[in-house]
Image (cartoon, coloured by chain):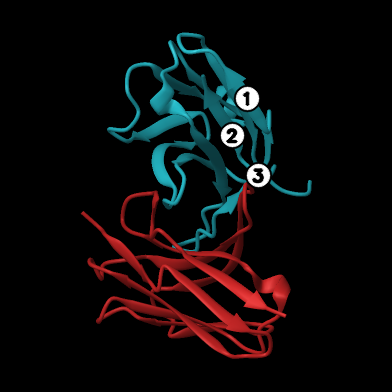
Chain colours: A cyan, B red
Amino acid sequence: DTGVSQDPRHKITKRGQNVTFRCDPISEHNRLYWYRQTLGQGPEFLTYFQNEAQLEKSRLLSDRFSAERPKGSFSTLEIQRTEQGDSAMYLCASSERTGAYTEAFFGQGTRLTVV
Amino acid sequence: KQEVTQIPAALSVPEGENLVLNCSFTDSAIYNLQWFRQDPGKGLTSLLLIQSSQREQTSGRLNASLDKSSGRSTLYIAASQPGDSATYLCAVQTGANNLFFGTGTRLTVIP
């Protein structure tokens, strides 16, 4: 396992369409995070899973967004009825809880462009 | 709410120069602080993680320090190289399970 894998790397979609992104974390990591990054900004937290349980969601995660992590392995992030403001880089990260030492490892991201 | 600030926003230096990037955060109740590198259009690469009980961490030409009480961290890069050109992001982890990021410092090392 070489790291966190995200698919696709790039996605162009028309406004109003649904899109789904996939994240495969590092295999022994039980924590998985989704972040969104717009141009010139740092990543912003969207949601967090510990194993299959979604434990935290940001207010940025509107009801058009849904994330799942079935069986505590890979995760999907779906955006319904996309809007131009959804254009951003969507980053996935994973970490393994070892006491308070929780180094996060990020994937290469999925760049979404809504036209 | 935790706020993370990075100064400067952009920095250009000639090759070989030593440099310091700054990060400050408003809430000192952090679990750890992590420095990342991001190349254009790419994901984040973890450089160094400093636990809240630690003062500094070193990896090769990189040295990161943490002063939790004053809410500051620095990333020192020795003998900079053109390959170091990238955006450097600092992030803190609080009692919540997510990271709060700064907006980054865009570094250009001129050959």
Q: In this view, does A113 lie to the left or right of A54?
A: right
Vertical order, A33 against B14 (above or below): above
* Quarter of image, res B32: bottom left
Q: Name the residue under label 2.
A: A111
- The percent coordinates of residue A103 (x first, y second) are 54, 60
Q: Is mark 2 on a helix, strand or loop?
A: strand
Query: Which chain is indicated by disc 2?
Result: A
Q: What residue type is labelled 3?
A: Gln
Checking the image for residue A11, the label placed there is 1
Q: Which amino acid does label 1 sit on?
A: Lys
- The residue positioned 50% from the left and 75% from the top of the image is B11
* Quarter of image, res B1: bottom left
- The percent coordinates of residue B91 (x first, y second) are 42, 61
Q: What element carries label 3?
A: loop
Question: Which of the two discs, 1 and 2, labels the residue nearer the N terminus?
Answer: 1
Checking the image for residue A108, the label placed there is 3
The reply to whether callout 1 and callout 2 are in contact (CB within 8 Å) is yes
Query: Which chain is indicated by disc 3?
Result: A
Instruction: Report the Cα–Cα distance between label 2 and label 3.
Output: 9 Å
Instruction: Report the Cα–Cα distance between label 1 and label 2.
Output: 6 Å
Question: Few, some or many C-alpha atoms within 10 Å of disc 2 (few <14, some 14-19, many ≥20)?
Answer: many
- The residue positioned 31% from the left and 56% from the top of the image is B95
- The percent coordinates of residue A63 (x first, y second) are 33, 17
Foreground mark, 1 or 3, reads 1
Question: Which of the two discs, 1 and 3, labels the residue nearer the N terminus?
Answer: 1
